[in-house]
Amino acid sequence: MSVPDRVVEPTQPLPAVPAPTPSWTATVAPAMAEPVSPVPPTPLRAGGHPAPAPIAPAPMAPAPMAPAMPKLSGLEARAISAWFGERKVLDRVSLDMPPGVITSLIGPSGCGKSTFLRILNRMHELVPSASLAGEVLLDGDDIYDRRHKLVDARKKIGMVFQKPNPFPAMSIYDNVVAGLSLTGVKVDRDHRDQLVETSLARAGLWNEVKDRLRQPGGGLSGGQQQRLCIARSLAVKPAILLMDEPCSALDPTSTRVIEETMLELRNEVTIVIVTHNMQQAQRVSQQCAFFLAAQGQPGVIVEHGDTDAMFSTPQDSRTHDYVTGRFG
Ligand SMILES: Nc1ncnc2c1ncn2[C@@H]1O[C@H](COP(=O)(O)OP(=O)(O)OP(=O)(O)O)[C@@H](O)[C@H]1O
Ligand SMILES: [Mg+2]
């Protein structure tokens, strides 16, 4: 086993939470911004010429209020290696996940996709035997830096798991706000109703549940439960949303709704999704990374880039074989 240049040892888990453990981690963003499509900044003057100096100072008219733009965050993994005990399962994986781009992680079972995803929000270190090397930069700041607390990463980088895991006996309303206290986010009572509505609306669930908010989350369908978990993650206002096969347990209709939700969220939160569904990767992601682990070897990224190009003109024959269904 090669010696990592920096190994992050397991740390103490977050305080215990009622079962089942929420599958999310959460977020922070200065304020819940309304969904607004990003618009490139308009140059002050076409052609880049400086404006002539005014002859006499004119009375200042109040500038028109620009719509609040959500600030999208980017994530960058640098030379990530991971171990479970002595067994190395990822080898120096680097990937840039730019703001506002949906990145899909694809590859055969066991190649390290979920491990990589969990490293992106410091869940990997909760496994007692786990260690890792490398850096994960959120807007240029290493989330593993000793100055940062574990809970900080959880606030900023949310996660939705394969199996929807709302608190089944807890009401839909309470499920949405369940992540706030666990991540130390305070929202006063007056703003809670608004936050619940906004989060459910962003997750594409509001219209289906607005008349039954006090009913248990466990009474929803699987697809609705998954969107409830997405709403629970969004309530903490994450900068990044990680999704590990979020539709693999769902029917085609629920899958379509969640895919639509993802595409709408793209303007507000940067999404990284693991999927075994090649059509889904093509439908929702703009960037794709193909992971592969040779027999007995740790996983690596064989190829990554523009999703359409990865599927139409892959550069590596192994990518071609995988995306055309020859193995995996
Ligand atoms: N808690 C763990 N303890 C020990 N080994 C583990 C643990 N979790 C995962 N592994 C091993 O790490 C490797 C990568 O697993 P991982 O779950 O990341 O793969 P994956 O690409 O997500 O697979 P799948 O597509 O089946 O979900 C596998 O060999 C797996 O057996
Ligand atoms: Mg997995």
Image: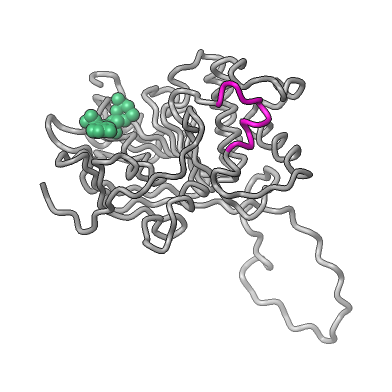
Q: Residue 323: where, in percent of width, then height?
A: 31, 25
Q: Identify whether 9 is placed above or below 104.
A: below
Q: How many labels does the image show?
A: 0
Q: Residue 220: where, in percent of width, then height?
A: 61, 17
Q: Quadrant of residue 217?
A: top right
Q: Residue 166: where, in percent of width, then height?
A: 55, 26
The residue segment tinted magenta is 167-178
Q: Which of 226 and 146 is in front in this view?
A: 146
The residue under the point 79% across, 59% down is: 65
Q: Residue 84: where, in percent of width, then height?
A: 21, 39
On the rendered structure, is 200 left or right of 225? right
Quadrant of the drawing holding the C terminus: top left
Residue 126 can be seen in this image: yes
The residue under the point 38% across, 37% down is: 288
Queried whether the magenta region covers residue 128, the answer comes back as no
Queried whether the magenta region covers residue 170, the answer comes back as yes
Q: In which quarter of the image is residue 321?
A: top left
The residue under the point 37% across, 48% down is: 12
Residue 111 can be seen in this image: no
Q: In which quarter of the image is ligand 2?
A: top left
On the rendered structure, is 326 left or right of 188? left
On the rendered structure, is 240 left or right of 313? right
The residue under the point 75% across, 39% down is: 194
Q: Identify whether 231 is placed above or below 225.
A: below
Q: Which colour scheme is used?
A: one colour
Q: Nearer the viewer, residue 102 or 156?
A: 156
Q: Which of 223 and 261 is in front in this view?
A: 223
Q: Nearer the viewer, residue 15 or 301?
A: 15
